[in-house]
Image (spheres, grey):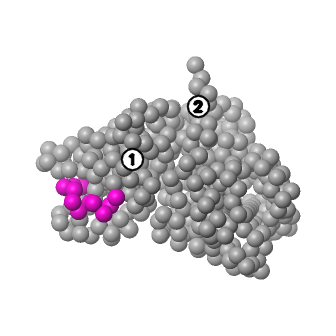
């Protein structure tokens, strides 16, 4: 029986083709952000998690999609939680201001979170509008003087925005496309609100980085898509948009930033063709054997990590983790790591303290108590912040504590 909260993806999210094949299977996991008290955490509902490849356009997507309202109504992730992320968005905003809109203008940020990104655009020069379904983040944006609509961005919502605020010079959408239930509707909304010579800039997680670094934990129900440049270039054409430039920033473990415009006269950067050729010929992103190899690499990583944990346990060493991000849920559930293996997980986000990693009884604690706990090994689940975490916990290492980095292969430091 098909559960209505969970629907199998039968048509490609980009090209609508039914020519899809499952290429990666990660079993069943709870929703990655369903942090809850210890009593209910293990009883959380589990949903199938896997990847399907589209033979028509080369897109890679989840096997199942979950009703968005189950996932995003009370989001515990805030953009400015980490300094690294903050700096990434600052640099990104500075580039837009300098290169594309130095005289000011109207900017819309889709999935504006707590307004961190929009706040880099000076209130005096820019009209700033945010939209985000997380009601608890609206007041944080308001404090920064940013108008934020608390809803999902759709074509219908874009009509309402257009009526009230007109169209926009810049539209940004960072790490949100993969969360969107209906991508075509979303892009129609963008097309509707973008000025003729406006620019739509969006950042998405880059499939090439996931495969290279073996970071399978970035696969969870909120991330429906695993993008590559080639399928995206074809997709945006349907909305009268042209990809004019791209970048591959290191943010979120490896991203693809795409610059798209309606203006056919803008010169298209030559490096786009080169990157597409690389995706086809060098990275083999459009061959299914690549994903079979990826699955094997994940299995090897699981085996290696378990053997490290078992060996250390024989020597009476205690484990804890660092970083209770959404990806930690996929990691622990797919790797069958439970409270028997890991005592706690430390995380800087106060909103998560006292809750458990979904599907486990592993408690999330404030790092300020790390000193008082008898921990020998800290597994860094927030691997994209490994350098910062290690630097911050020099004292732990001086006392003989070890760090374990899981990717690309588990390694004790
Ligand atoms: Zn497709």
Looking at the rendered image, the quarter that the N terminus falls into is top right
Cα separation, mark 1 vs mark 2, equals 25 Å
Is 287 positioned to the left or the right of 126 in the image?
left
Residue 190: image location, x then y, percent: 77, 55
Is 282 positioned to the left or the right of 357 in the image?
right
State the residue at coordinates (47%, 32%). Answer: 46
Q: Which mark is residue 355?
A: 1
Question: Label 2 CB, ligand 1: below 8 Å?
Answer: no
Q: Nearer the viewer, residue 331 or 126?
A: 126
Q: Which residue carries the number 2 mark?
A: 6
Badge 2 density bin: few <14, some 14–19, many ≥20, Cα 10 Å: some
Numbered range of the magenta stretch:
366-377
State the residue at coordinates (45%, 40%). Answer: 295
Residue 306: image location, x then y, percent: 28, 42
Q: Residue furthest top?
A: 1
Residue 149: image location, x then y, percent: 70, 56
Magenta stretch encompasses residue 375: yes
Q: Nearer the viewer, residue 59 or 336?
A: 336
């Amino acid at each position: 029986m098909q559960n209505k909260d969970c629907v199998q993806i039968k048509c490609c999210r980009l090209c609508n083709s039914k020519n899809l094949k499952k290429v990666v299977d990660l079993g069943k996991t709870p929703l990655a952000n369903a942090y809850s008290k210890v009593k209910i955490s293990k009883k959380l509902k589990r949903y199938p998690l896997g990847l399907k490849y589209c033979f028509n356009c080369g897109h890679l997507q989840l096997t199942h999609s979950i009703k968005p309202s189950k996932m995003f109504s009370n989001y515990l992730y805030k953009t400015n939680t980490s300094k690294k992320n903050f700096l990434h968005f600052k640099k990104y905003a500075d580039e837009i201001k300098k290169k594309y809109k130095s005289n000011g203008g109207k900017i819309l940020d889709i999935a504006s979170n707590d307004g961190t990104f929009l706040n880099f655009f000076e209130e005096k020069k820019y009209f700033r509008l945010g939209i985000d379904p997380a009601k608890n983040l609206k007041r944080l944006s308001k404090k920064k003087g940013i108008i934020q609509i608390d809803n999902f961005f759709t074509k219908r919502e874009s009509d309402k925005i257009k009526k009230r605020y007109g169209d926009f010079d810049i539209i940004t959408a960072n790490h949100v496309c993969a969360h969107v239930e209906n991508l075509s509707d979303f892009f129609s909304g963008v097309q509707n609100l973008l000025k003729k010579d406006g620019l739509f800039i969006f950042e998405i997680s880059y499939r090439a980085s996931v495969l290279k670094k073996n970071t399978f934990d970035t696969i969870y129900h909120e991330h429906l898509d695993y993008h590559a440049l080639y399928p995206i270039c074809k997709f945006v054409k349907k909305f009268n948009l042209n990809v004019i430039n791209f970048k591959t920033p290191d943010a979120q473990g490896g991203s693809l930033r795409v610059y798209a415009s309606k203006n056919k006269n803008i010169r298209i950067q030559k490096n786009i063709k080169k990157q597409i050729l690389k995706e086809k010929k060098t990275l083999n992103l459009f061959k299914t054997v690549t994903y079979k190899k990826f699955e094997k690499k994940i299995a090897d990583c699981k085996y290696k990590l378990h053997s490290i944990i078992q060996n250390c346990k024989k020597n009476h060493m205690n484990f804890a983790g660092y970083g209770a991000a959404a990806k930690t849920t996929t990691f622990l559930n797919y790797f069958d790591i439970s409270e028997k293996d890991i005592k706690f997980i430390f995380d800087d986000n106060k909103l998560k303290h006292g809750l458990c990693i979904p599907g486990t009884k592993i408690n999330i604690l404030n790092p300020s108590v790390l000193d008082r706990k008898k921990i020998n090994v800290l597994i860094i689940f927030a691997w994209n912040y490994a350098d910062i975490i290690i630097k911050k916990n020099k004292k732990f290492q001086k006392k003989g504590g070890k760090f374990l980095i899981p990717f690309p292969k588990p390694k004790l430091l």
